[in-house]
Image (tube, rainbow, N blue to C red):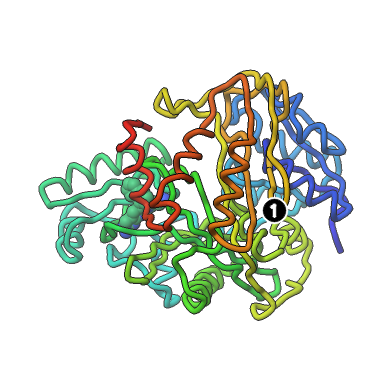
Amino acid sequence: MSFRKILVANRGEIAVRIIRACKELGIATVQVYSQADADSLPVMLADESVCVGPGAGKDSYLNVPNIVSAALITGAEAIHPGYGFLSETASFAEVCASAGIKFIGPPVSAIEAMGDKATARETAKRAGVPTVPGSEGIIASEAEAIKVAAGISYPVILKATAGGGGRGIRVVFSEDELIAALKVSQSEAAAAFGNADVYIEKYITSMRHIEVQILADEHGHCVHLGERECSVQTVRHQKVVEEAPSATLSHEQRLAIGAAAVKAAQAVGYANAGTVEFIWTPSGEFYFMEMNTRIQVEHPVTEAVTGIDLVQAQIKIAAGETLPFTQEDIRWHGHSIECRVTAQDPSRGFAPGAGRLTNVRVPGGLGVRVDTQIYSNYLMPPFYDSNLAKVIVWAETRAEAIARMRRCLDEFLIEGIPTNIAFLKTILDDPRYRGNDVSTAFLPTMMEELGMTG
Ligand code: MV4
């Protein structure tokens, strides 16, 4: 059994990515789009398209009734949500199910279990996955916050249970700051997520962000596809450069963290593609951080080193197929790097830009992949994220991959709006980056040294 027609409930490069996977599987595509995206590449590439509302995301790509109606009217049997928008909204997956449409993603129960980060942490801990010392679930009172923090010792980090990806977090260095920080964290969380609940962890002062790709079918099989190194992020938790594998992990460590990721996924009855995020310490210990129950922006680096098409795998799993490989069949070859090219202006605090791309010239050559929605004369709408393109390179070694990426960034020409391409070159040229001497502090430090804000 496979699907005959899939609706793509997203936009930009990930919509293009999903359409490509469908085409190769012989599946027809319906692209939903906003009025601002009428001339977009996914609309051109899809077999059919349906306008679901005005430019603002909340009126179009988050408009559940319109998207589900578009699927019913066009006879799409499944919806691929991509990343962002409705991809991790359990109620959307539920509405799809009640309309008889397959949501290409995990079960509603798994989205819910991992969507609440304090619950996810407890679930991982109970399953035997290492977690950072901290509170048991959410903080119920100021007295409990003081007691927990004193017990694990400062610094501590406050995280919103409804957050994720670093939104609504506060680092606290001493007890005098704790209660004020707790109040700020709770009110920020309430405003951002409609849920004020916060949990506490020991703050790990030097860490790498290492995440593990997993794939699970709906028949109880689950494998990991190794890790991605995502430590190069801005102080606002924007990932900028990602790699697979991490140059830091030995093969034994890869298998150990991979097995932990599989355990976490199995603890919530996971199916489809997912990513388990870990803190990696300088001494080689790792701790569960959170799980993302969707395909991620940086998935292509894992595809490059494993040869597995993750979006095709998502579709086949949702159609009820069994995983065609076991853990022992997964092999890793070479090194892959992704750079996120964005419409951000480094000279204006990385403010997001929009407007007409008067001229575009995309890099290419052996071992180069560019996932993008842009083309010459494309009008970048102001409503959405600032991603313009992902440049993904593959080479035998990390050094060769860096040289290839550097060459690609020189080739890439985008005229008409400011981009971060020069900033990406600065990162690739930094001896700390080249020497894999990075932690999550690397990029904020580099930017401060260069007098950059943002
Ligand atoms: C942490 C941490 C240190 N210790 N958790 C959470 C979301 C992820 N994207 C970043 N997060 C972190 N979680 C513990 N227990 C450090 C980070 C972190 C960070 C925290 C504050 C300000 C900037 C940061 C940049 C990268 C990682």
Q: Amino acid at mark 1?
A: Gly
Q: Nearer the viewer, residue 40 or 372?
A: 372
Q: Nearer the viewer, residue 34 or 75?
A: 34
Residue visible at 76% across and 32% down in the picture: 41
Q: In the picture provided, is 285 more to the left or to the right than 300?
A: left
Q: Quadrant of the N terminus?
A: bottom right
Q: How many marks?
A: 1
Q: Position of residue 293 (x, y in %)?
A: 57, 56
Q: Is residue 125 visible?
A: yes
Q: Is residue 90 visible?
A: no
From what the image shows, is residue 120 above or below residue 39? Answer: below
Residue visible at 79% across and 41% down in the picture: 71
Q: Position of residue 209 (x, y in %)?
A: 42, 57
From what the image shows, is residue 29 above or below residue 299? Answer: above
Q: In the picture provided, is 368 more to the left or to the right than 47?
A: left
Instruction: Find out if the beta carbon at label 1 lies less than 8 Å from the nearest ligand 1 atom.
Output: no
From what the image shows, is residue 46 above or below residue 438? Answer: above
Residue visible at 64% across and 24% down in the picture: 380
Q: Position of residue 82 (x, y in %)?
A: 65, 46
Asked where in the image residue 400 lies, by quadrant, the reply is: bottom right
From what the image shows, is residue 408 above or below residue 35? Answer: below
Specify few, some or many for label 1: CA neighbours under 10 Å numbering under 14, 14-19, or 20 or more: some
The secondary structure type at the circle numbered 1 is: loop
Q: Nearer the viewer, residue 398 or 214?
A: 398
Q: Nearer the viewer, residue 303 or 137?
A: 303
Q: Quadrant of the C terminus?
A: top left
Q: In the picture provided, is 372 more to the left or to the right than 4?
A: left
Q: Position of residue 206 (x, y in %)?
A: 30, 58
Residue visible at 49% across and 44% down in the picture: 240
The residue that mark 1 highlights is: 367
